[in-house]
Amino acid sequence: MNGLNKRLNNQGALQWDDFKSQIAALSECSKMEKIDKGYSNDDKYIIFNAEEKPQYILRIYPIEVSSNKRSDFEALKRMELQGINCSRPIEIGVLPELELGYMVVSFIDGHEAKDALPLISEQEQFDIGVQAGRELFKIHRIYAPDTIATWNERMTAKHQCYRLDYARCAATIKQEWQLLSFIDANLHLMHDRPNCFQHDDFHPANLIVNNGKLSGIIDFNRCDWGDPIHEFVKVGLFSSEVSVPFSVGQIQGYHHGEEPTEQFWQLYCLYLAMELISSVVWMLKVKPEELPDMMAKIDRVMEDHECFELIVPKWYSGFIKSRIK
């Protein structure tokens, strides 16, 4: 049980009136509906307006993390200034009596892309991917302040920690020696890479689709700074499993319709290989019951790249060949 759930249990179940009376943005709204999905420790609710139509998303979290959430809120303000198609920041604050913090953002109408994409044509999936890639490109126009350490420093330190944790855990990736050798041989590629704003969880579960188009991007709560190419690791691990046309479209949309460079694929492979290690460690810590599913995804990635002897994944090259015919 996370700290928030313990606190809610101690306080008793929060009622709609607890929120409506203390959060200005909700004063004219009619009701809330809990969202029971995702890996976030926050409690999330859909907030309905007086006409009982979805208007906002409310996130509730322990008051101790309020400063981090303030950073997330400021990130949404940056997105708004850049014209990014995503949730808009509405209100943020604390409920001192309940020892809770809250954030209110705009509701984006539609369905998660992971559910919507398999139900539409390949061309529509590809087009939505192109739209997603273009939005991602706009996100990466924001550069990190000088106070943020370089990407190479931060990513190297993080990878070393994951590598140690992976060595201690019981789970083992098939042919891990090839994976680890590939990573070690390519770590130098991270030197002098740009340090840009990252959504850091950009995949179909965090994209909303409506009427065959991308409606918006949600859940910036894992945002970070780093190499823009690192953002694409979710394509290999998650998005390509949901929709190959979408995944190819995202890559090509990001590159303005051009084929990615060899440097892109080299860095993509390096970051994806590193992600496989961190995913095992993360899953064992957070959702150990889902480790078999994660290991199946990792096996698929290893096959896509023939244990990283291929830098362009089979799903990408196969789709491009099918479009040429």
Image: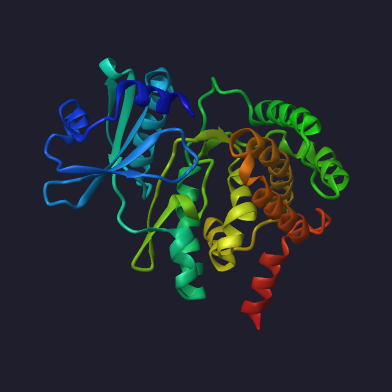
In the foreground, 283 or 186 = 283
Can residue 23 be seen here?
no
Looking at the picture, tell me which residue is in the foreground, 40 or 224: 40
Image location (x, y in percent) of residue 119: 45, 71
* Direction from residue 17 to residue 254 in the image, left or right: right
Q: Residue at x 49, y 49 (%)?
A: 136
At 82% from the left and 54% from the top, the residue drawn is: 307
Question: Residue 285 versus residue 269: which sits nearer the camera?
Answer: 285
Q: Quadrant of residue 285?
A: top right
Left-right relation of 245 to 127: right
Please determine whether, in this image, residue 64 is positioned above or below residue 190. Answer: above
Q: Is residue 164 left or right of residue 33?
A: right
Indicate whether 190 appears above or below 9. Answer: below
Residue 287 pos. (x, y %):
59, 39
Considering the image in quadrants, where does the C terminus appear? bottom right
Residue at the (49%, 35%) spot, across then down: 223
Residue 159: name its quadrant.
top right
Q: Name the residue at 66% across, 49% down.
A: 294
Q: Which colour style is shown? A: rainbow
Q: Quadrant of residue 21?
A: top left
